Amino acid sequence: MTQTQTLRQKSPRSQNGRSGALGNTLRCVLVLGVIAVVCVALLAVANRFLKTEIQLDKDTSALINQIAPTGADDNTAHASYIKMVDLGKGGYALGDLDAYNKKYGSSSRKVRALYTSTHKDTGKVTLVVEAEGKGYVDAVVMLIAYDQDNKISGIVTKSQSESFWSHIKDVDQLYKAFIGTSGKIESDSIASQTGVTVKYTLDGMVSAVNIANDFVARLGGDDQGGQTLVAVTDPEKLEKLAVVSDAQTFLFTAVDTATVAGVYAGNNGDYIVEAASGLGSHSEVTLLVKIENGTVVKVAHVSDGFSEYVQFFRDNTELNKIFAGKTAADVAALDAKELASSTGATKSAQGVCTAVANALAYAAEEA
């Protein structure tokens, strides 16, 4: 037998060996794929159903001691003068933190905990709220201390993972802009005072502060969360209201729930809801929706977390072509994917549809 014949006789075995090796490799890949899918599913379940328990650790206590001083060193303050509040034990108008967050919080903001800081000499008790807002990267967690008038007396960042945090040149100056404030705060106002330009990070901080402000007011029994009926004087807001209403003056009533910031009443009887949705491509979508008899009259864009490439849903003319004249049932029947077909902006389409639906739902509840 020649050498060539020998090789030919061996070649089928060689091919079988390679086929077997390939089969083993494919099986390994399949098994690893299944393991990966299971792991992702387990993580999803954990994120959905397992709640991270907030603890008053020494680091948190030290930060609280900075903004609500106890007059004691950090170790003593942690051991004796700074406590986490259990709302379930009574003493406050709110009795359940989860229930509060379900009603007034959202995926982009919530209250995480309430603490008290007691001065060792005077016995003065300061309330400190731990709250989070959605920044550009992830949650920005703030600790906010309040005086007896529910105005901010101290503030500090507990944690953040923002990629542009270092672009905030003077964090202390930024904190000072919040001192003495209460109620709803606008990011633009803080930005103009401080020159901070990291928009989404600042929005996260302001969102955390706003829900903390609302929370601490409601703790004392204020059903409006510290908000009152106020005349609208901000030129930018008046300009946006003019898109949906011919009224000359407006009174604003804050609601500040997860879906509705408040209601504007025009001097001509117009009823306008400022409603939001957390379904934008990056963060909340906010619209002004003029409503009459359960029907959308006009819509105006306020703010959004859209990508810079999404302009279609920032155009008030296009928004009114879609929503004017529609009822809640009409809006529910809209296909966000179909709306997005010309732009590819599916999340943005979902965001505007949901914001309008939230406005109509709120108006129906109040009717």
Image (cartoon, rainbow, N blue to C red):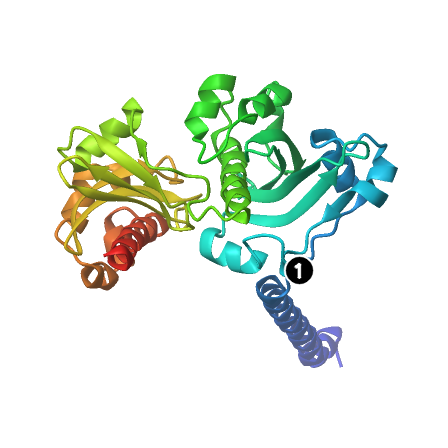
Residue placed at 37% from the left, 51% from the top?
Answer: 347
354 or 364, which is in the foreground? 364
Q: Is residue 358 above or below residue 302?
A: below
Identify the residue at image location x=63%, y=58%: 90
Number of numbered markers: 1
Q: Amino acid at mark 1?
A: Lys
Nearer to us in this view, 41 or 57: 57
Q: Quadrant of the C terminus?
A: bottom left
Residue with the mark numbered 1 = 89
Residue 298 seen: yes
Residue found at the very far front of the displayed protein = 122
12 w.r.t. 227: above or below: below
Question: Residue 143 location, x and y as percent?
Answer: 64, 38
| Label 1 crowd bin: few (<14), some (14–19), many (20+), radius 10 Å | few
> In the image, what residue occupies the spot 65% across and 40% down?
128
170, above or below 160, in the image: above
Whether residue 311 can be seen here: no
In the image, taking residue 265 as reference, residue 73 lies left or right, namely right
Q: Determine whether the residue tagged by mark 1 lies in a helix, strand or loop.
A: helix
In the image shown, does 284 or 231 lie closer to the viewer? 231
Q: Quarter of the image holding residue 170?
A: top right
Q: Quadrant of residue 144?
A: top right
Indicate the position of residue 178 as horizontal and vertical percent values: 54, 27
Q: Residue at x 52, y 60 (%)?
A: 99
Which quarter of the rendering shows the N terminus? bottom right
The location of residue 28, given as percent across then percent down, is 68, 72
